[in-house]
Amino acid sequence: MLHGSINHVSISVSDLESAMRFFSPLLAFLGFSPGEIRLYEPAGTRLTVNLNEANGVAFNVWEAKPGLRGRPHRLYEPGFHHVAFNVARHAQVDEVAELVPRIGGRLLEGPGEYPFGLGGYYAVYFTGPDGLKFEVVHMPAAEARARQLGHL
């Protein structure tokens, strides 16, 4: 495990079942095993723990507490901005761009090249449940480095 690497990301949604109709196919495409919905009594709410065994990262989806569910998320306010997922091939970004509208998401930008990474940065940006923003990106230089380190 690499020092400073991401262990997990957790987000909150207003309706967990509805959100998982979006996240289950997306996370499966990205190599995660979607978890079952379960109650976490100490927090008084439900969640899913979705693991990617290939890289050890979890993407957890929590249901907001009842009194907080009606608050809309607004992009660019303090707090959550977006989560970006890496993919191994350029074509996989295009596949996600085709998948997202079918599972209820909304494309924001791309797919296309962006000036954010050395050696190429091909990405698609989209929103999912509750207007939360996500990105899927292929970075050829990062892929080459992962191959060099034996991670792919």
Image (cartoon, grey):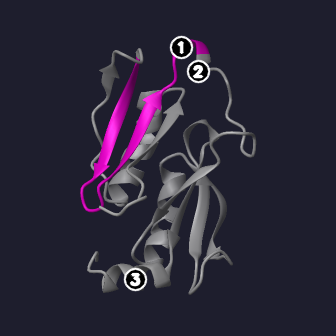
Q: Which amino acid, mark 3? A: Arg
x then y, percent, for residue 19:
47, 36
- Provide the residue designation for mark 2: 69
Q: Secondary structure at mark 2?
A: loop
- Provide the residue designation for mark 1: 66
Q: Secondary structure at mark 3?
A: helix
Q: Nearer the viewer, mark 3 or mark 2?
A: 3
x then y, percent, for residue 4:
43, 58
- Give, as a single range, the part of the protein colored magenta: 45-67
- Provide the residue designation for mark 3: 145
Neighbours of disc 3 within 10 Å: few (<14), some (14-19), many (20+): few
Whether the residues at callouts 2 and 1 have beta carbons within 8 Å, the answer is yes
134 sits to left or right of 114: left
Whether the residues at callouts 3 and 2 have beta carbons within 8 Å, the answer is no
In the image, residue 39 sits, relative to residue 76, either above or below, namely: above
x then y, percent, for residue 47:
38, 29
Residue 53 magenta-drawn? yes
